[in-house]
Amino acid sequence: MATMKLKKLQYELEDIETFENPKIELEQYTTSSHIAACILHTAQFVYDDIKDKMVADLGCGSGVLCIGAALLNAKLCTGFDIDPSAIKLSVENAADRNVSERCEFVLCDVKTIYTSIKSKSFDTVIMNPPFGTRLKGADLIFLKMALNLATKAVYSLHKTSTRKYVMDTAKRMGVYSKVIAELRFDLPASYKFHKKDSLDVQVDLIRFVLPGEEQ
């Protein structure tokens, strides 16, 4: 596969339909085309973790990460979300990008995903989990579920302010972790309680490597 340039991938992911009425309790913030492209481009062209791989996204939202992975020739991309409207949106977005044959979307509570999905069912998990601002610890719940599903690596966004705690948690689980990018997550004023038009949040893209895999 020829290398798809980052700008080309970002262009392909622009204008994906997002939530009209995001649910604050689920921390439904849209992953921008720029951030999604950065994550996916790094995962494939630095670490070879997407092409011909089984890829999952926990809390898939609008499906942008699954769609991007499909555009990079993942074998199959599966998105999981507890919100039926998110699943419907993801299905429609995948169809609009002509990648439906490489994408599937499952209505599922990520916190109990282990009851319905076998462990180690995917090579790679790529996700933008809740930051845990509404439900404390939600980010680590997602991370633990992702590490249970992946055989090779997990790529996950976490607030920079939680870096030490997240990486210490991974170490206790016997998982190698590395911050591979520092990004600014632009949170638009999606909810009534937001007083500013947008808020920049410093986030880390962390790659977690399962035991036995090359670092």
Image (cartoon, helix red, strand yellow):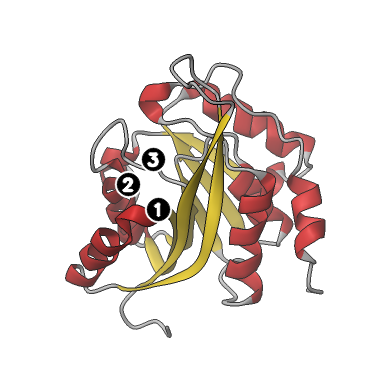
Three-letter residue code for mark 1: His
Task: Judge left or right: residue 45 versus residue 166.
Answer: right
Alpha carbon separation for disc pair 3 and 2:
5 Å
Q: Name the spot of residue 29 as percent of width and height, x first.
A: 51, 33
Q: Secondary structure at mark 1?
A: strand
Q: Earlier in the sequence, mark 1 or mark 2?
A: 2
> In this view, which residue lies farthest toward the front?
196
Quarter of the image with the C terminus is bottom left
Task: Judge left or right: residue 6 versus residue 185.
Answer: right
Alpha carbon separation for disc pair 1 and 2:
7 Å
Q: Name the spot of residue 3 as percent of width and height, x first.
A: 78, 73
Classed neighbour count for the residue bearing mark 1: other residues with Cα under 10 Å, few (<14), some (14–19), many (≥20)? many
Alpha carbon separation for disc pair 3 and 1:
9 Å
Q: Secondary structure at mark 3?
A: loop
Three-letter residue code for mark 2: Asp
Residue 119 visible in image: no
Task: Judge left or right: residue 19 versus residue 95.
Answer: left
Q: Residue at x 64, y 56 (%)?
A: 69
Nearer to me, 121 or 137: 137
Q: Which residue is mark 3?
A: 130
Three-letter residue code for mark 3: Pro
Q: Name the spot of residue 213 as percent of width and height, x first.
A: 39, 81
Q: Name the spot of residue 95 as percent of width and height, x first.
A: 74, 35
**Occupied quadrant, residue 204:** bottom left
Contact (Cβ within 8 Å) of mark 1 with mark 2 = yes
Q: Earlier in the sequence, mark 3 or mark 1?
A: 3
Quarter of the image with the N terminus is bottom right
Label annotation for residue 158: 1
Nearer to me, 144 or 101: 144
Contact (Cβ within 8 Å) of mark 3 with mark 2 = yes
Q: Earlier in the sequence, mark 3 or mark 2?
A: 3
Label annotation for residue 139: 2
